[in-house]
Image (cartoon, grey):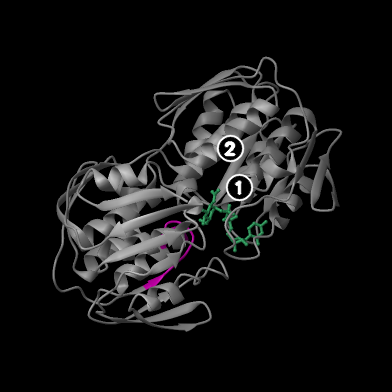
Amino acid sequence: MKKLIIEGKHKLTGTIKIGGAKNSVVALLPAAMLTNGKSVIYNVPDISDVHMLLEMMKILGSDVTFENETVTIDNKNSVNKEIPEEYATKLRASYYFMGVLLAKYNHSEISYPGGCSIGSRPIDLHVTGFEKLGAKIKINNNKYTITSKKLTGSDIFLDFASVGATLNIMFAAVKAEGTTNIYNAAKEPEIVNVASFLNSMGAKIYGVGTSEIIIEGVKELGDGIVEVIPDRIEAGTYLIIGALLGKNLVIEGIIKEHLGSVITKLKEIGCNLKIEGTTVTLNKVDKLKPVNVKTLVYPGFPTDLGQPMSTLLTQCEGESLFEETIYENRMRHIKHLNAMGANIKLFDQSALINGKTELIGRTVVATDLRAGAAMLVAGMLAEGITTITNIEHILRGYEKIVEKLSSVGGKIRLIDT
Ligand code: UD1
């Protein structure tokens, strides 16, 4: 079992470079299997979710290489197979093979996906979308078998602007006969990134980044090329850490438009950040103001940054409100923050945070990926030593986190027990 050991309160100086976005790459890799040709994906982060997806692609017969932040995929020998349950259940994004294999072979077999336990996370919108395109779905012991004689374009309205459902329906529709309109589509930047990859293969996808996406089906797809966008969640996490501990800490390689809600909130709190092009320089300030943070779909405040942000709110002087609206189970880190000295009252999906409270190092648990990030921020801030267990969650999404924080003066190490 791996643990992180952090000695808190060290100032951070230097530069942290942001890697490629986890939530983009985990869709880009399955998407690369839509073509029989070759693809190149640049700026790929070295995270465990990427390695797991590459293993699944090898099972499906793809030749893949991963070197110098670049993944190449050649599908000349690819075949359709059931994705073994032990792979599918390791991460959420395995569900993208549903749409991809359905589009490519009119048949996909895969278990219900894994991922963080942050709520019930149904996939009914994906399934309804596939059905609208003409597929039939059988569910047996958690295994989904999805088949179609032929996929035909359709109008699909999503009850919720789901990232996963938008992408999975896009994958299934890309080679369907006729036009598909997805209404109330998710607008996250990762969706734009994935659509531009598919369009580089010859797909005809319009309107991404808005709530109506139009997909004109094409018969064949060719070779593809794409660069993964910077990870706005990794960047946001380091902005939060830099706001609390930075001494001319530079976060390099961001797209500031993707971080609009986060940067606005940090400025409201009174954080000292200077944005120049794709870099942000942060300096700790002594007095921070309380603020309310409510997570929403993009361009609202990202649910994936709500938990690390709640740690920052413990350092604001006064009462802040943190509300989670996307998932039911995003508050499991609060008891650990309180154990470290925070003063947080939990009301179902809301947390009333009273600050400023000194945090003290403790042994805490990364209950999920972003809860782990919240504990990491707390550990960096706390007096003494913090030990974070279950950090496999953190390693799924944060590239070289120990190296990146150590290189700017953080006292953090990973141990294998
Ligand atoms: C993706 C991200 C995750 C992020 C989330 C919201 C990946 C791999 N993960 O997750 O990091 O937190 O977007 O930005 O990209 N829902 C349904 N039925 C469905 C699908 C979703 O009810 O068929 C609900 C979910 O339970 C949740 C909400 O919609 O309450 C958002 O889910 P969705 O946008 O689909 O998130 P994911 O794609 O799972």
Chief secondary structure of the magenta portion: loop
Kind of residue sitting beneath label 1: Leu
On the picture, is 121 further left or further right than 83? left
Instruction: Judge whether residue 297 is colored magenta.
Output: yes
Q: Earlier in the sequence, mark 2 or mark 1?
A: 2
Q: Residue at x 57, y 64 (%)?
A: 118
First to last magenta residue range: 293-305
Using the rendered view, name the quadrant where residue 29 is placed. Answer: top right
Cβ of mark 1 under 8 A from ligand 1: yes
Query: x%, y% of residue 146?
Result: 81, 42
Q: Are marks 2 and 1 in contact (CB under 8 Å)?
A: yes
Residue 120, compared with residue 256, is above or below; it is: below
Residue 340, compared with residue 407, is above or below; it is: below
Using the rendered view, name the quadrant where residue 181 is placed. Answer: top right
Pointer 1 residue: 91
- Judging depth in this view, the residue of 296 and 115 nearest the camera is 115
Query: x%, y% of residue 16?
Result: 25, 43
Pointer 2 residue: 52
On the picture, is 268 further left or further right than 292? left
Image quarter for ligand 1 equals bottom right
- Judging depth in this view, the residue of 327 and 201 nearest the camera is 327
Cβ of mark 2 under 8 A from ligand 1: no
- Of all residues, the one furthest to the top in this rendering is 76
Residue 51 numbered mark, or none: none
Viewer can see residue 302: no
